Image (cartoon, rainbow, N blue to C red):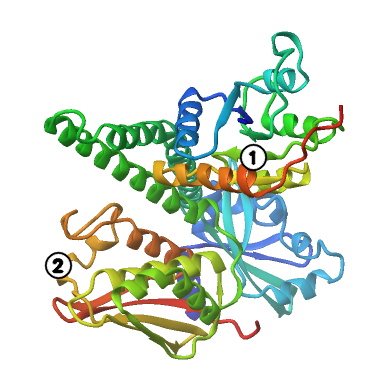
Amino acid sequence: MSDLKYAALLDAAPDAMVMVDEAGRIALLNVRAEKQFGYGHLELIGQKVKRIIPEGFAERLVADGLRSPVEALAQQMGTGIELIGRRKDGSEFPIEIMLSPRESPEGFLVTAAIRDISVRKEAEEVLRKTLEELRRSNEELGRFAYIASHDLQEPLRMVASYLQLLSKRYKGKLDSDADDFIAFAVDGATRMQQLIQGLLAYSRVATKAKELLAVSSEEALRRALANLRDAMEESGAVVTHDPLPNVLADEVQLLQLFQNLIGNAIKFRRPGVPQVHISAAKCDAGKWTFSVRDNGLGIDSQYFERIFGLFQRLHKREEFAGTGIGLAICRKIVERHGGRITVESRLGQGSTFGFALEGSATR
Amino acid sequence: MPMEVLLVEDNPGDVRLTREAFRNTDTYVHLHVASDGVEAMEFLRREGIHAIAPRPDLILLDLNLPRMDGRQVLALIKNDDSLKTIPTVILTTSEAETDVVQSYQLQANCYCSKPMMLEAFESLVQTIDDFWLTKVRLPRQGPD
């Protein structure tokens, strides 16, 4: 009675099940196996299992010549092994097998659960192809952005330089309309130069990326502050920081990141003394979360996503200069380091920008 | 006494900007122009139509030139005993580190990247003039 139940269980199994003896012949198989390989039950009993799995499985496992078939099978128990299955009509399809060897009065027997993984393989292939497409496309875009901004610079330099020369030499010598026209043209050309330089800087985050090495974030901060010395003097800004850790980073990009964030903190200030504080807190998995906190203008929460966009600005040109690319570059740098950049802010009270970096125990 | 400066530059827009920038300085400068490396060498060696060309006090050399590029010209100048004593300043849009290193290895006297903005460019030319044409002592004559 229980034999019948077991037989029913076997035949109800979703995977093909095949039991193979020491000689590599099929001793038992279930209905699913018949259907999967396109054979009648009796056609496979006593046949070598290599008929349906040409590579066999013991052979594959002992390919390194160090183990006997028995040892190899025992070790691979439960592991999914990818092989090729062959149907009666000769067509082949990818399979995954799980093996369970056991001793029996009839000798050593191996039960193989055989799963048709054609669908999974196809999906993996589609994914691989899509990722490859995406990688190529991204690379091309990056090159395009670099080439476009690089090659656009020369003609733009001519336009901007000669407009500026015109303005210098003929301001007040033609009529006031001409002065206005030239001024608008110069302004446009100058802004275009800044946009292109911004675009180049943005594309360089990817193209000029260096290997991530152990870097002193405190040293990077120090150099960023040295670069911001003029802005700090002009605004009277006070910048403080906690001790900062060594991290795995691209030194140049870390410097850029600090410089952009602190530069912004100083630029978008309220009346009074701008105060900026940089700190780092250890979080799990060996990472450090950095915070750059300011007491500046603050940002309305509805713009929290937009500020990181390319060429996105929240203020009029007359209010604040800038191309709107600084935070886009920051985000790209942080993402390149495997993190996310965050912002907390209240309008009129100041903002805190945060990002995580992988710590480095050595220097 | 005018200072003779040879500008090797193929972009006429850049030539004119350089000329205008030198006009802003107090130095009396004769600016000679060669638009590629071949012409530059003919001028320096006083060949053909350049037979009576003056010996430059300073050479401003762009790197990316048609026919014979600036790197080759630099190598030729600095390997020529009669020409290598002429201070040769690389003046180029390239900011590539490899170009900088190679230029100094070929014995360029210094390397200047052309700035994007006019004011910065004019300031650079003024600085070159201040240093190479005013402050430093140049050899009176080359070996002849």
Residue at the image point whose x is 59% and y is 23% from the top = B33
Can you say which quadrant of the picture contains the C terminus of chain B? top right
In the structure shown, which secondary structural element does the residue marked by tag 1 occupy? strand
> Vertically, is A28 above or below A5?
above
SS under mark 2: helix
Which residue in the structure is indicated by mark 2? A302
Residue A200 shows up from this direction: yes
Q: Nearer the viewer, residue A21 or A207?
A: A207
Q: Residue at x 40, y 45 (%)?
A: B119
Q: CA distance from mark 2 to mark 1?
A: 50 Å
Closer to the eye: label 2 or 1: 1
Give the quarter of the image for residue A182: top left
Residue at image location 73% in from the left, 66% down from the top? A21
* Along the line of sight, the residue nearer the viewer: A118 or B44: B44
Q: Which chain is mark 1 on?
A: B
Residue at image mark 1: B90
